[in-house]
Image: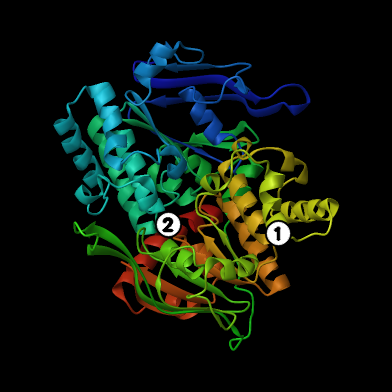
Amino acid sequence: MTAERLLSVRDLSVTFGAGTSRVDAVRGVSFDIDRGETLALVGESGSGKSVTALSVLQLLPYPAAHHPSGSIRFQGTELLGAPAHVLQQVRGDRISMIFQEPMTSLNPLHSIEKQVNETLVLHKRLDRRAARQRTLELLELVGLSEAESRLGAYPHQLSGGQRQRVMIAMALANEPDLLIADEPTTALDVTVQAQILKLLRDLQRRFGMALLFITHDLGIVRKFTDRVCVMSEGEIVEAGSVTDVFERPQHPYTRRLLAAEPKGQPVAAPADAPVLMEATDLKVWFPLKTSVFGRALSHVKAVDGVSVIVREGHTVGIVGESGSGKTTLGLALLRLLRSEGRIAFAGQEIQGLTPKRVRPLRREMQVVFQDPFGSLSPRLSVGQIVGEGLGVHRLGATPAEREARIVEALEEVGLDPASRHRYPHEFSGGQRQRIAIARAMVLKPRFVVLDEPTSALDRSVQAQIVDLLRDLQARHNLAYLFISHDLAVVRALSDEVVVLKDGKVVEQGPAERIFEHPREPYTQALLAAAFALEADEAGAART
């Protein structure tokens, strides 16, 4: 090891289970990270990227996961099999980690202030006042709007992008020597992605921090990292400088990965197709402050007077920055959040219906949530999760028929039906997203809210899921409300686009017109940020 060598991983293998259920998730992986360097691990979902990263901090579940071989040395200290007191000194202080799914990584019972405070108090021994001040500085540093008013907020009160910023603030609190970032920009829109990446680069230069960057976004890898390791089926198949790997890829898998991107056009549907879902002047206001008598003194206007129409067989894309109200709008349409304004489904007014009267319509109105792990019960097998709705709505006359429907749904989303006896924690983030899609599609709905359904997926799998969604839409005449910050995916799927900012509609209209001739400066800025990264990926694919 040289004087600058910070982390050295040699011949690392990770195995889950034993005997016939044995899974070799990582096999013979070796790489180094020098001080101040950025190394990217890229590859398809399930390739072993996150398992490798979790091994560095020894965070894999024991004894379910074990290491048949390997060495992980950090500044000369062996971490593989290290005693608890050694790992406690390293975790959160010298090495920090930004996890892929912030909702499941943040404690739902603790405020944001308490969770960021914890690492400061534990490692820096700060008193309450100093810890609060440092927490506020960190939240402002990562660009969390109205940071001071959000100190007392809980994770469920923040958007996906806002929760990711809190995770980044926690990881940077003690200015670590090595930051492991597992999909740190997955839940963020393109403009915020650029801000977060600039922030990480500035902090890296200021503190000489090394970065292990795990991502499926090849545009970010090209612009942000020094070296890259390409993983496939638990092995590193190619490694080198970003320039060499992107411009002169040697392995067939690397070339296929660089060429993959969502393509094609939305499913052709009649412009005058019947209206399936309609909302007029929809409002969702959350009380921020209340008087002693319980009267709301101020509100967060998450959705403020939005009108939208979704026709049969059509896809309406909802885009905007994190916190703009995209998810809130989708949940309000499904009557999963209290709202004001008119909502009609298939010509029937549903805003004033009681929960009991709405229940029969639930089968026809489904949702795929942004955070698949948080929405999947850890106590149920995949088969039970996908089949739960069949039992609730009494679909399938016999257990055998219900089992056949479960198998069909899993096959449609590209999962091995034999995996239905496993549990969510045994799958990668992208595989869990497929399970969530299968759970919605097994009921054969008419209207589906897709809340960032491809955000956790690498580009090659995104393309497969986009094709799958198109196929299902054409086959069953489905209507989609597609919520995403990935404008390339929105463009490939949507007939119409609604641009939201601060709960209001900035611009809406046919997708072709929005993408080719945006009228509003905010829309123009979103598109410019999105397709700058897309241009980088396209250039890599051409080379």
Q: What is the x, y in percent for residue 208?
A: 28, 29
Which residue is more in the foreground, 51 or 224?
A: 51
- In primary-sequence order, the first of circles 2 and 1 is 1
Which residue is more in the foreground, 6 or 52?
A: 52
Q: What is the x, y in percent for residue 1?
A: 42, 14
Quarter of image, res 152? top left
Please tell me whether residue 439 is drawn above or below residue 106 in the rendered image: below
Q: Residue at x 49, y 30 (%)?
A: 53
Evaluate whether residue 419 shows in this view.
no
Category of crowding for the residue at label 1, using alpha-carbon neighbours closer than 10 angstroms: few (below 14), some (14–19), many (at least 20):
many
Category of crowding for the residue at label 2, using alpha-carbon neighbours closer than 10 angstroms: few (below 14), some (14–19), many (at least 20):
some
Task: Give the structural element (helix, strand or loop) at label 1.
Answer: loop
Evaluate whether residue 62 shows in this view.
yes
Q: Residue furthest bottom?
A: 272
Looking at the image, residue 126 sits to the left or right of residue 74; the answer is left
Which residue is more in the foreground, 389 or 436?
A: 389
Q: Residue at x 39, y 49 (%)?
A: 156
Looking at the image, residue 337 sits to the left or right of residue 397; the answer is left
Which residue is more in the foreground, 481 or 278?
A: 278
Looking at the image, residue 254 sits to the left or right of residue 483; the answer is right
Q: Residue furthest front?
A: 293
Task: Give the structural element (helix, strand or loop) at label 2.
Answer: helix
**Amino acid on which the number 2 mark rests in the picture:** Leu
**Amino acid on which the number 1 mark rests in the picture:** Val
Name the disc covering residue 161, or none.
none
Name the disc covering residue 442, or none.
1
Which residue position holds label 2?
Answer: 533
Between marks 2 and 1, how big is the CA–CA gap?
35 Å
Look at discs 2 and 1 and give the one toward the viewer: 1
